[in-house]
Amino acid sequence: MPSLEIFARQSAEYRDTVLPPRVRARLAVETATAFGWHRWVGTEGDVLGIERFGASAPYERILEEFGFTADNVARRARAVLARVSGA
């Protein structure tokens, strides 16, 4: 989603075509602030974002430190799927 603000201004009908209400398993991955994403993932979804400020290191290390790895994203996606399916 390129802009949370523009998406929020769209009609409910349009938003529902992008994020169908029946799809409750949602994971937002944002390499900046997680602010604003919880609205769109719902109560059963999850947001992987950066909740603090001030880290400095090569980007590879920063991404790993903040959990932006394929393994962590997959783990969190599986947790959302399990939560939504009741497994």
Image (tube, grey):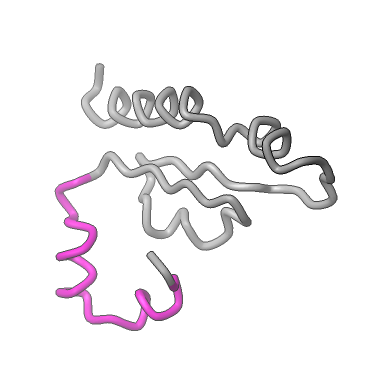
Residue 73: % across, % down: 45, 31
Residue 48: % across, % down: 53, 42
Classified by dominant secondary structure, the portion drawn in magenta counts as: helix
Placement of 32 over or under 8, stated as above or below: above
Placement of 14 over or under 80, stated as above or below: below
- The quadrant holding residue 27 is top left
In magenta segment, residue 6 = yes
Placement of 56 over or under 67, stated as above or below: below
Instruction: Tell me: 85 left or right of 7.
Output: left
Residue 65: % across, % down: 70, 31
Instruction: Tell me: 14 left or right of 47.
Output: left
Instruction: Tell me: 63 left or right of 69.
Output: right
Give the residue drawn at x 58%, y 59%.
35
Give the residue drawn at x 49%, y 44%.
47
Nearest the camera: 10 or 72?
72
Placement of 11 over or under 51, stated as above or below: below
Give the residue drawn at x 38%, y 64%.
1
In magenta segment, residue 8 = yes
Nearest the camera: 37 or 55?
55
Residue 52: % across, % down: 75, 48
Give the residue drawn at x 54%, y 30%.
69
Q: Residue furthest top?
A: 87
Magenta residues span 3-23
